């Protein structure tokens, strides 16, 4: 008996939609990263990008538990001396909630070419309106 290895040509991608309203940020990110990585499929192969596409809606209504809203900080650097910028998540969730969700998912994906390619299949929307009705996404519930 030989081990099954998925090939790039054999991958059939589906679309999934996750409603993040009232759900913890980490649980939404774990579910999205699992689907993007393809680990929910029986034909998962680590060295092949066999994940699906994910649409996350209602990103502005996602919940941060505990004191993360006041204590958690998002850092970025401009590349110049003294160019470190810090933004609290309370400000980030008011201005760019899509960025907060996509950063959480990015941190849970592998740090290689497959992770970068998987992140391009993630679409995050602030509200319930999205442009992927034609793909007929399958609704997935966050547990």
Image: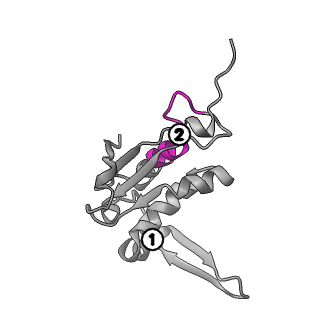
Most distant residue in the right direction: 81
Most distant residue in the left direction: 128
Q: Earlier in the sequence, mark 1 or mark 2?
A: 2
What is the quadrant of residue 31 in the picture?
top left
Dot 1, how many residues are within 10 Å of its Cα: few (below 14), some (14-19), or many (20+)? many
> Residue 94: x and y, percent?
36, 75
> 131 or 83: nearer the eye?
131
Residue 64 seen in this snapshot:
yes
Q: Quadrant of the C terminus?
A: top left
Residue 32 horizontal side relative to residue 125, left or right: right
Most distant residue in the top direction: 1
Q: Tell me which residue sits at (73%, 88%) in the image.
A: 81
Instruction: Please tell me whether residue 84 is drawn above or below residue 8 in the rendered image.
Output: below
Q: Quadrant of the N terminus?
A: top right
Q: Tell me which residue sits at (46%, 65%) in the image.
A: 100
> Residue 135: x and y, percent?
34, 50
Q: Secondary structure at mark 2?
A: loop
């Amino acid at each position: 008996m030989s081990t099954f290895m998925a090939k790039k040509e054999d991958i059939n991608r589906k679309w999934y939609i996750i409603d993040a309203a009232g759900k913890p940020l980490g649980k939404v990110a774990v579910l999205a990263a699992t689907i993007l990585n393809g680990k929910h499929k029986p034909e998962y192969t680590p060295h092949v990008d066999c994940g699906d596409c994910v649409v996350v809606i209602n990103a502005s209504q996602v919940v941060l538990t505990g004191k993360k809203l006041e204590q958690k900080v998002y850092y970025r650097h401009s590349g110049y001396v003294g160019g470190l910028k810090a933004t609290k998540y309370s400000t980030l969730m008011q201005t760019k909630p899509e960025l907060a969700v996509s950063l959480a998912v990015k941190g849970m994906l592998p740090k290689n070419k497959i992770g970068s390619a998987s992140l391009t299949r993630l679409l995050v929307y602030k509200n319930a309106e999205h442009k992927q009705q034609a793909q007929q996404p399958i609704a997935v519930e966050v547990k």
